[in-house]
Image: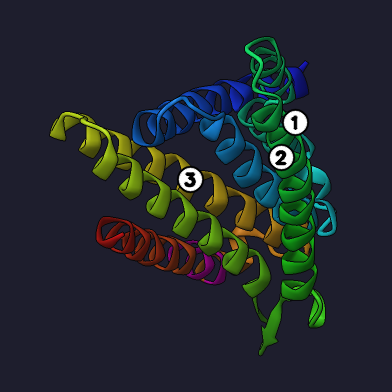
Amino acid sequence: MNQIVAIALGGAFGAVFRFLVSTGVYQWLGRGFPYGTLAVNILGSFLIGLMTEALILQKVAISQEYRAAILVGLFGSFTTFSTFSLETLYLLEQGNLQKASLNVVVSVLTCLIAVWIGLQSGRFLLSFAGGTIRWMGWVFPYGLVTANAIGAFIIGLVMAILFNKVDVVLEHKVAGIILLTGVFITLTGLYLILYLLENGHSVKAHLPAMLSVFFANTFICGTVLWIGLWLGRKL
């Protein structure tokens, strides 16, 4: 039951984020081609490839629900094969055979490439010492923190680009940034704590080390997200 609830929560966030991204892309580029669906599928494919390596290979038993919420709930609802199929069929019914064929070829190839890049990125991050740095009893999971930073950068970049292209009230922009930043940093920080617990750390004996990892992740992700926002405004 806990796993079902976790998937439901992850799915809720993924569906809302998909709506915001796809709607923003359509308002930016128009509806002459399924740009919005293509964008969320490519982005989701890369992220699920990256996070599959980061979450599955670490094998943190205490976070089964957490992994299900992200891989099944969040990314499962963020990406959409059904909408891709429907939009392709609409193009065929409208006689746009060239656009329909292009949508099929581009969607399949780019999503496969995006998953492959995500998987390879995750494997590279975790290839050295299991993605961890150990020094005098301290453990820093640099692989997971780097994966979190990549996610934060993508969130900041996408949000900034969409806010530039779509007419959104300033208060909504600020609220959206704060909400996504808070949720992302909290969830990624929680997973790092669970990882440390699974690898022999205890709150009583290793609290300073665990807090150091949590705040380092918060600082790095916050900084990288700001860079993504800044770069997105320049594009």
Residue found at x 61% / y 36%: 38
Which label number is shown at residue 220?
A: none
Decide if residue 206 is on the left or right side of residue 29: right
> Which residue position holds label 2?
107
> Which x, y percent locates residue 48?
72, 46
Q: Which amino acid lies under the numbered mark 1 shown in the image of this protein? A: Val
Q: Which amino acid lies under the numbered mark 2 shown in the image of this protein? A: Ser
Gap in Å between the C-alphas at discs 1 and 2?
20 Å
Q: Is residue 199 visible?
A: yes
Other residues around mark 3 within 10 Å, as few (<14) / some (14–19) / many (≥20)? some
Q: Residues at badges 1 and 2 in contact (C-beta under 8 Å)?
A: no
Quarter-wise, where is residue 12 in the image? top right
Q: Which residues are magenta?
A: 209-215
Query: Which SS class for mark 1?
Result: helix
Q: Which amino acid lies under the numbered mark 3 shown in the image of this protein? A: Phe
Gap in Å between the C-alphas at discs 3 and 2?
27 Å
Gap in Å between the C-alphas at discs 1 and 3?
17 Å
Other residues around mark 2 within 10 Å, as few (<14) / some (14–19) / many (≥20)? many
Q: Is residue 94 magenta?
A: no
Which circle's residue, 3 or 2, is located before the other in the chain? Answer: 2
Residue situated furthest top in the rendering: 93
> Which residue position holds label 3?
184
Residue found at x 58% / y 69%: 146
In the rendered image, which quarter contains the N terminus?
top right
Give the mark count: 3
Which label number is shown at residue 72?
A: 1
